[in-house]
Every structure is written in C-alpha cells, then in structure tokens.
Image (tube, rainbow, N blue to C red):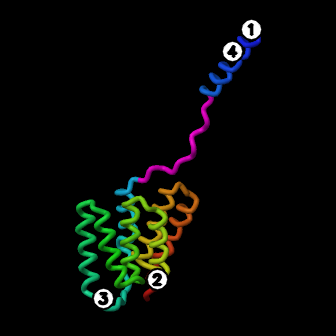
Amino acid sequence: MIWRGMALLAGVSILAACAQTRTPAAAQAPVLDRGAALRAIRDAGHGMDSAVQVQPLRDAAIDGYVAQSRAAEARNDYAASASALDKALRLAPDAPDLLQARAEVDIAQGDYLAAEKNAIRSFTLGPRSGSLCARNWQTVVEARTGMGDAATAQQSAQRIKECRIAPPVRM
C-alpha cells in the first residue's frame, strides 16, 4: 500500500513537472504590414526612370485588365485584382510589368513565395535597371521579410542600388 501511494505520488509529481515545463515557442516569421510593404515596393522605383523604355504594342484587352486590377486593388479586393492580372498574363505571359504587378498583389495577399517568383521572373525578363528593377528587388526584400529570412532580405536590399545607373559624365 505504501508502494502504491509512493508510486502515485511520483506519477503525479512527474505529470505536474511536465505540465509546468514549457517548450520554447517555435521561431515565427515577423508579421509583415502588407500595406507598408506595398508602399515600400512602389516607392523603391520612384524617380529612377531616366532612360527611354521601348515597349511593344499591346493588346488593348491587357490594358483593360490592368485597369480592372487597379480598380479592384483600390477597393482592397485583392482576389479580383489578382484575377484580372492573371487574365492579362494569359495574353502576355512574359510582360515584366504585369509580372511585377502580380508580385505586388501576391504581397498584399500574403503569398510571399509567389511574390518572389514573379518579381524574379520580371527582373529576368525586364530591363534590369530603373524603377521596375528597384520594385523587383524591393518585392524580394518584402517577401523574404515576410518569410522571416532576414539575411536574404538584406542581400536583396543591396541589389536595389544596382538598379540605378549613373548618368554619363558630360563636359
């Protein structure tokens, strides 16, 4: 009887100890302010376009879808904005500006992997300088920040500087 009492006491003590033992919380990615992230992306390319950009003529439907996307975004309807951009991308799948716009909507929706993928594809197909380039890399910064990858976000932030091309020396 004494053994049972001691065993019961030992069992209760172990359970009590287990209940009080706390495991460290899993490291979580910081919560990204998506509105601030969108502003940072769009501000990144502000004032960088000083070069002539040559763009092929586009189907008017693409411009219509882009307008629909912007209107939906203004209403904070990111699902409708994404849908309109997806329709535009079906018509012009390699358009860097459309890919970047889709990446920005991905950030707004919290889909950081898709945002990074679209921004990198836009950079690869785009001019690799100027405002679109800066927006591409700022998107990667925001996506990696949202994923909790500060090291890659820092490296990507350095790449933004490479988007600005110094003007030629004039004498």
Which residue occupies 40% across, 62% down? Answer: 107
Mark 1 against mark 4, which lies toward the viewer? Answer: 1
Label 1, label 4: how far apart the Cα atoms are: 12 Å
Mark 3 crowd level (few <14, some 14–19, many ≥20, 10 Å Cα) = few
Determine if the magenta segment contains residue 60. Answer: no
In the figure, 122 relative to 81: above or below?
Answer: below
Q: Amino acid at mark 1?
A: Met
**Rendered image: mark on residue 125:** 2
The percent position of residue 160, horizontal first and vertical second, equals 48, 70
Q: Amino acid at mark 3?
A: Arg
Mark 4 crowd level (few <14, some 14–19, many ≥20, 10 Å Cα) = few
Residue 81 or 150: which is nearer the viewer? 81
Task: Write down the residue under mark 4.
Answer: 9
Q: Amino acid at mark 4?
A: Leu
Q: Earlier in the sequence, mark 2 or mark 3?
A: 3
Magenta stretch, residue numbers: 21-32
- Secondary-structure class at tag 3: loop
Task: Write down the residue under mark 3.
Answer: 58
Task: Write down the residue under mark 1.
Answer: 1
Q: Earlier in the sequence, mark 3 or mark 1?
A: 1
